[in-house]
Amino acid sequence: MTETSIKESLISKIFTTLKQALKGDESFDYTSGSIKKAVILLAIPMVLEMMMESVFALVDLYFVGHLEHSSFAIQTVGLTESVLTVIYSLAIGMSMAATAVVARRIGEKDPVAAAKAGMQAIIIAFAVNSLMSILGVIYAKEILILMGSSIESAEHGFRFTQIMIGSSLCIMLLFLINGIFRGAGNAAIAMKSLWIANICNIILCPVLINGLEPIPAFGLVGAALATTIGRSIGVLYQVYHLFFGNGILKIKIPYFAPDFKQIRALVKIAAPGILQFVIASCSWIFLAQLVATTGGDHGSAGYQTALRIMMFFILPAWGLSNAAATLVGQNLGAKQIERAEKSVYTTARYNVIFMASIMIITLVFGQYIISFFTNDEQVKTIAIEALQIMSIGFIFYGIGMVLINTFNGAGDTWTPTGINFFGFWLFQIPLAYVLAKHFNMGPTGVFIAIPVAETAITLAGIVFYKRGKWKRIQV
């Protein structure tokens, strides 16, 4: 073959793989063949999926950042998102359990058992979410004040919080059903559901916030309505494909009958997984409260702005690392332990490259990115400092994400739970408190504690990965 024909063949293969990844191809066997191709087929839609999840917060942040009393609005969005991380923790923990079990059953070539397991996870989601939604609606104002908001700011924004927490079942189902699809190897459906939800949110946000005859301007409340409607439409898309799609999972109504043996098995995996993410999210809530009390409304708004932008970059990396969970789960199910290990190394390498690129972008262009989202100079100054300090640890964040998803994909949810407990509660929180209060560094001390703790957590994850307990877990 000539050099030209070789290049043309390579380009053709790349485009074919990209097309497969975006379209979704459940016929591909992730327990054999090229590991690089397997990672790419899973990672591309997963990255785009998580990018779309992060867009929700950025779209809200952009439009409310230009409202009157924008510091109140930005703070309300940020503090509400911090509270919602508890619900995200439940959703991620359940979706992680669903991914692990569904992937293991698919690896064992038992799609019926995989489908039944997925439906039992949905039953659990409905059960656990109802109480949280009711409490969120009743105590929205008190929650914001507890988080460090001023009474004036809480009065201004509690309706937004009511709607967001009250509709949290949509968040739960969006994460959970996508976890089911990822476990089955169809990451493209998960991606498309987030794209649809975000397109709806992007269209509705300016309309509901600013008004468009005959629709009145709802202001900050409009952002909550737009996000809730968008997520609901995304869930409807997922449900359609669960029942009427042509994928490997074939859902039938009888699968929704409670199977308490399967529910116990899922809860056994999900409980430490939920605790794992609750530990992390409660740490972020404490940090948000610490910034609010030491930096005031402007300090809080600046931190929340930087955090939303940081999450925009981190969530795609989390999506890429999700490829490790599916590949580890399916290959352990197929008794391909060495292949599972190779999948982890390949995914980690790609994530390091991605996060290193993002670190450079945020360090060099951080001030320009921040300026796009707020016109308040005080908020802008704090946000730039926060973003640049937190981005220093991006490479370690990337490695840590892959390791967490490796443990979770194998069903070893206790290991990352223990790492998170020591890393966040016994290290990050005390360090942030001492720097902010004892050394009078205020919000800057909190910003420094974040990359330091995340680096320590990643190093601990490497040690436990090498011990290999995750290879021997049965689910």
Image: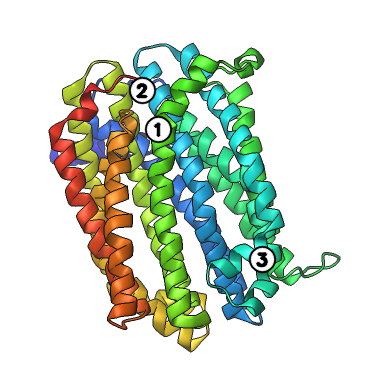
Asked whether 331 or 274 is in front, the reply is 274
Binning the other alpha carbons within 10 Å of mark 2 as few (below 14), some (14 to 19) or many (20 upward) gives some
Residue 188 falls left or right of residue 131: left
Disc nearest the viewer among 2 and 1: 2
Q: Nearer the viewer, mark 3 or mark 1?
A: 3
The amino acid type of the residue labelled 1 equals Gln
Q: How many numbered markers are drawn?
A: 3
Which of the two residues, 99 or 162, is positioned nearer the viewer here? Answer: 162
Q: What residue does disc 3 label?
A: 141
- Quick one: label 3, few (<14), some, or many (20+) residues within 10 Å? many
Mark-to-mark CA distance, 3 and 2: 50 Å
Q: Where residue 123 appears, x then y in whole percent?
A: 60, 27
Residue at 44%, 40% in the rendered image: 274
Q: Are marks 2 and 1 in contact (CB under 8 Å)?
A: yes
- Classify 363 as above or below 245: below
Q: Residue at x 33, y 56 (%)?
A: 425
> Looking at the rendered structure, which numbered label has been put on residue 20?
1
> Residue 69 bears which disc, if any?
none
Furthest residue toward right: 214
Q: Quadrant of the N terminus?
A: top left
The disc labelled 2 sits on which kind of residue?
Answer: Phe
Where 88 sits versus 253, above or below?
Answer: below
Horizontally, residue 298 falls left or right of residue 273, namely right
Q: Position of residue 442 (x, y in %)?
A: 36, 80
Mark identifier at residue 28: 2
